[in-house]
Amino acid sequence: MPELPEVETIRRGLDKYVVGHKILDIEVKAPRIFTGERKNVIGARITGVRRLGKGLILNLSNDYSLAIHIKMTGQLIYRGKETEDIEISKTKVGSIPNNFTHVIFELDHGAKLYYNDQRRFGWIKVVRTKDVMDLPFFKTVGPEPPISKGSHEKELTLEMFREIISGKNTKIKPLIMDQSRIGGIGNIYANDALFKANIDPGRSAKSLTDDEMKNLYEAVIDVMKLSLEKGGASELSYVNVLGNEGSYQRYSLVYGKKGRECPNCKTKIEFIKLGGRGTFYCPNCQK
């Protein structure tokens, strides 16, 4: 599932290419993905793009907003005159529109914004701007690591991070992936951050020392900043708004590297399941 760096990359792309456009029409091919009245969107201009954890909010000029969560395989792809010469990923997108294009926003100046979703888990909701934060996802999402200046609305500080972890019996990896506690950390960056901090992902949260909590907090920020710099990780279907893949997967530390040598000690990377999620770690380095 796209995580904070991927969704922030999408937000930046939408901010660059979509803000200022007027929505002329909306074609909805999968009604369960799009909820709300189309009439409350058509004719409005997109005035800004916000992100909260893994969720996106497109504010409109008429006091309505589009709340969006792309879930596992959602894609938001912009095509306009200024991007018509930019090639899209043949492996992650193919052509546009395609069989997985479920919502098409027709914008002014001949531009379009496509929403693709192979598994159809994502959603787009039309809501009044003042009511966006009442949606269950946005209401419950926790504070997020400060990886991009000005992009976060609930900043996770070191003190907050320590408070979240201290005294908890939960294993540390599923704890930092709990979106109600910390927004934006998914499986890829939880794996790599725990490796960078030399912490066994199966340890109980309450067993971490103050220094280990500080190291983990800094490691989370470091790996997610690197991913943002690399345009995110295109593990499944993720692409940016131009339809291009990210490259963090080429820089991951342990994620997806079962049986390969640890970059620090050459021990074989092991794979287990924790909280139902695939977990990669070095049994020698991570204690």
Image (cartoon, rainbow, N blue to C red):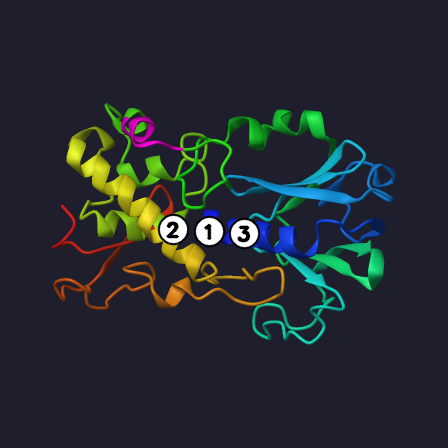
Spatial CA span between label 3 and label 1: 14 Å
Magenta residue span: 156-162
In the image, which disc is placed on residue 5?
1
| CB under 8 Å between discs 2 and 1 | yes
Residue 104, magenta (yes or no): no
Q: Percent position (x, y) of residue 139? A: 56, 26
Query: Residue 249 lies in what quarter of the image?
Result: bottom left
Of callouts 3 and 1, the N-terminal one: 1
In the image, which disc is placed on residue 72?
3
> Which marked residue is nearer to the observer: mark 3 or mark 1?
1
In this rendering, does residue 208 appear at all?
no
Q: Percent position (x, y) of residue 68? A: 64, 43
Residue that carries the numbered disc 2 in the rendered image: 224
The residue type indicated by label 1 comes to Pro
Q: Residue visible at 21% across and 42% down?
A: 215
Q: Percent position (x, y) of residue 285? A: 13, 53
Name the element at disc 3: loop
Of callouts 2 and 3, the N-terminal one: 3
Name the element at disc 1: helix
Residue in the foreground of this view, choosing between 273 and 250: 250
| CB under 8 Å between discs 2 and 3 | no
Residue in the foreground of this view, choosing between 75 and 162: 162
Q: Residue visible at 43% across and 62% down?
A: 230
The residue type indicated by label 2 comes to Met
Looking at the picture, does residue 223 appear above or below residue 34?
Answer: below
Residue 157, magenta (yes or no): yes
Q: Percent position (x, y) of residue 158? A: 30, 32
